[in-house]
Amino acid sequence: MNENLYSLLSSHFPTTADAPCMILPDGRVWTYDDVERASGRIANLIVALGLKPGDRVAAQVEKTPEALVLYLATLRAGMVFLPLNPAYQRHEIEYFLKDAEPGLFVYRPQNRVLAEALALKTGVRHVRELGDDGRGSLIDAATPFANDFACVPRKGDDLAAILYTSGTTGRSKGAMLSHRNLAANATVLHAYWHFQPGDVLLHMLPIFHVHGLFVACHCALLNGSAMLFEPKFDTARAMRLLPQASVFMGVPTYYVRLLAEPGFTRASCEHLRLFVSGSAPLLKETFDEFRARTGHTILERYGMTEGGMFASNPYDGERRGGTVGFPLPGMRIRIADAAGRAVPPGEIGQILVKGENVFTGYWRMPEKTREEFTADGYFKTGDMGQLDADGYVTISGRSKDLVISGGLNIYPKEIEEIIDALPGVAESAVIGLPHPDFGEAVAVVVVRRKNAAGATLTEAGIAAALRGELASFKIPKKVFFVDDLPRNSMGKVQKNLLRERHTI
């Protein structure tokens, strides 16, 4: 049996030649037949360059149909795909190329001088261009090759992709994802979220990340669905396209921006059956406002680079704001103390996960891999959370974001939820800053809500509002007001940058 992920995905492609796969902003349509032919040509090119099964193909390109086809061609040829954020700069790119040693590096034409210099320096044998318009030397070189390509047999444990973690602390780690890891998660999500014939996915996420490339694309491809394939999120475009879609996946920022549009109403969403949110925590306020405005309840889920999705609110059943639902079928989640023992419901502990979708380890880091797994095979996510009496999982924050003040553990989310509910607050981020007496002191960075009528936010006012809600050691010693919070490409607040920028 060929366990190549492409074999699984393509077995669900529609058999009609004109079935749409990607519908572009300019009206052009890529059919599933187009995808098969183009991926066949690129797979033939990769093999002709001398790459062998297991070799890496790195791509630092913008979101285009050709970029998605490159990923599928890499799978098809038995190689390992390495997507890189287009925002990465010289130092980061050099590290990834040196560490992963790809046989082929595909880059944007405007980065030619840098890409070729780094390829020469790191020993990358082949480089090709793929522009933001879908053109370039990669496509030119592939054009003469045959459309047909026999999918290379792969075992489930063979690598399909390497995704580097954000590297906010220390050296970036390459999470190794096998064909089985990706297939297991794709099939579970496809079933759990009730994908059905005729579904159309509005795809506005980037495709260098788990959310856009694996969660969104895999579900659509497994369903043989059309994707409204947009280069990025744009509120006005989303408003125009929502009536043509049945499923939308986004990060919380997308939903906040949609709610800021007066025309975003029940009528504009009546064709949708599912809104999914992930990659960053969804504020309960956003969850409630969205339901009140549209009649739809956002389905929030939880996952990470090292294994895709671990938990999800139910498709059928109560979706609880502030939670990420239940462990997905086949997943085991343990909320544990420092010794790895399960804690009772309601208590906060570290989140450990186990399942077929959990990655095989970190690329060329065997010691780090061993550190991150328990003796009984659970992966230590680095997140803190709790289970309620009904089995819903709530994320309390990253363990590295835990504030320990005077020997007492303080979980930022508890404080953030109260501050975010105050009049005039758009959002907040609680951090720990060095303190001579307490070791760490609680500080909060607050973004004021624009045009908030009648709301005057002050440091004293925020502290006063918290005193009746929280123990005194949780009250922030300092409040900083800023215009916005620093975020990574998937919308997660970069608390490490906040800790660098502020002092008490």
Image (spheres, rainbow, N blue to C red):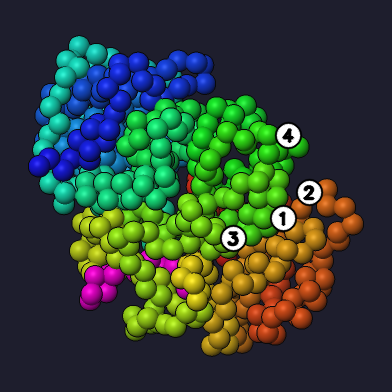
Q: Quadrant of residue 417?
A: bottom right
Residue at 12% x, 46% y: name it.
155
Residue shown at 61% from the left, 72% from the top = 414
Q: Secondary structure at mark 1?
A: strand
Q: Which callout, 2 or 3, points to the residue nearer the camera?
A: 3
| Viewport quadrant of the N terminus | top left
Does any portion of residue 95 appear in the rendered image? no
Give yes or no for contact between labels 2 and 1 (Cβ–Cβ under 8 Å): yes
Distance from the alpha carbon under mark 3 to that under mark 4: 24 Å
Quadrant in the rendering for residue 383: bottom left
Q: Earlier in the sequence, mark 1 or mark 3?
A: 3
- As drawn, 136 above or below 9: above
The residue closer to the viewer here, 420 or 165, is: 420
The dot on residue 263 is 4
On screen, residue 232 versus residue 39, left or right, reads: right
**Residue 372, horizontal then vertical, whole percent:** 30, 69
* Callout 4–callout 1 Cβ contact below 8 Å: no
Q: Earlier in the sequence, mark 2 or mark 3?
A: 3
**Residue 426 disc label:** 1
Q: Nearer the viewer, mark 4 or mark 1?
A: 4
**472 left or right, relative to 97:** right
Q: Residues within 10 Å of mark 3 (few under 14, many from 20)?
A: many
Q: CA distance from mark 4 to mark 2?
A: 19 Å
Mark 1–mark 3 Cα distance, whole angstroms, equals 18 Å
Mark-to-mark CA distance, 4 and 1? 21 Å
Q: Which residue is mark 2?
A: 450
Residue 78 in the image: x percent, y percent? 16, 37
Amino acid found under the numbered disc labelled 3:
Gly
Query: Which is the main secondary structure of the residues drawn in magenta?
Result: strand
Q: Residues within 10 Å of mark 2 (few under 14, many from 20)?
A: few
Give the residue at mark 3.
321
The residue that appears at 70% across and 38% down in the rendered structure is: 265
